[in-house]
Amino acid sequence: MARTIIAGRPYSYHPFLHLAYEHMAGLGLRHVEIVVPKPEELAATQAELARWGLTPSSMHGECDVQRADLARLVEFQMPTLAQFGCRILFVSVKADRTPRDVVYGRLREAGDVARQHGVTIVLETHPDLVTNADVALATMRGVNHPNVRINYDTANIYFYNEGVDGVAELRRMAEFVGAVHLKDTSGGYRAWHFPALGRGVVNFPEIFRVLDAAGFTGPYTLEIEGIEGENRTERLVCDRMAESVGYLRGLGRV
């Protein structure tokens, strides 16, 4: 079995973010996905991560494809990633009314910048550039850059599409996957129902099999976003993350 990088997303603990690092470290996680820190936050962020033995395997950054200066925006974030030894810039992108060929060109230029720093930009499974396999493949082929890839979100594929099979969608774009968000779902279209792993419709064993076959080893990032209308408590968010890590441990991934 491939050795996989499993990370946690601190926002899974919202609104109790102060619990995240200590609790994830206690569960045996050694990697996290964090927002790219502001310059004035660098020292404190590094100290806190070091305190709990955590390393960023990916960073959530800015990548506004509607901006003509996108490459410069990406360049500005590169020193921070280098300081943390992070090689994955996770972003959400939306073209809106910007012509696709313009967007593809800007992402290609951003990919050139990322390549110079040994970084890969991964585009989240969001409309309107990575909504599903059809859209994602059009984007990947249009950009045509090895340092611009997909962040496959195992739940968003259901949230943003009706009547899809998440594994079938993944098989079609597996060669372009550069990072993964592990998130379960009830499977409903636009249904904000994201429970602990193993409690929804996502076929995680098959997800891992597909990505193992593609040679992908991570990062896989746990993202547990909860259920609409529930009363979120410290106990709930911690138990849900612990259950999810336990589920992955049962699959031999932690």
Image: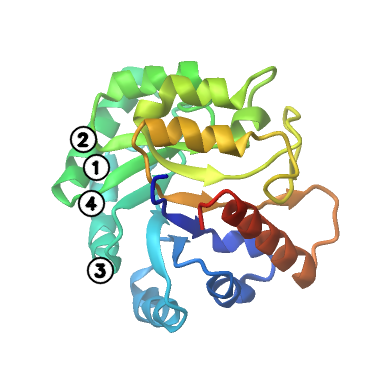
Pointer 3 residue: 83
From this view, report whether residue 204 is shown above or below residue 248: above
Residue 143 % position (x, y): 28, 25
Tell me which amino acid carries mark 1: Ala
Q: Which residue is mark 1?
A: 71
| Label 1 or label 3, whichever comes before in sequence order | 1
Q: Determine which residue is flagged by label 2.
A: 109
Element type where label 4 sits in the image: helix
The numbered mark, 4 or 2, whose residue comes first in the sequence reads: 4
- Kindly indicate whether the residue at mark 4 contacts the one at mark 1 (C-beta within 8 angstroms): yes
Disc 3 and disc 2: Cα gap in Å? 22 Å
Residue found 78% across the figure and 70% down from its top: 235
Residue under pointer 4:
75
The span from disc 2 to disc 1 (Cα, nearest Å) is 6 Å
Answer few, some or many: residues within 10 Å of disc 1's Cα (few below 14, many 20 plus, some between 14 and 19).
many
Q: Is residue 37 visible?
A: no
Cα distance between the residues tagged 4 and 2: 10 Å
Looking at the rendered structure, the secondary structure element under dot 1 is helix
- The vertical placement of 152 against 114, above or below, is above
- How much space separates mark 4 and mark 3, taking CA atoms? 14 Å
Tell me the amino acid under the disc marked 4.
Glu
Question: Circle 2 — which element?
Answer: helix
Q: Which mark is residue 220?
A: none
Q: Quadrant of the N terminus?
A: top left
* Label 2 or label 1, whichever comes before in sequence order: 1
The amino acid marked with disc number 3 is Gln
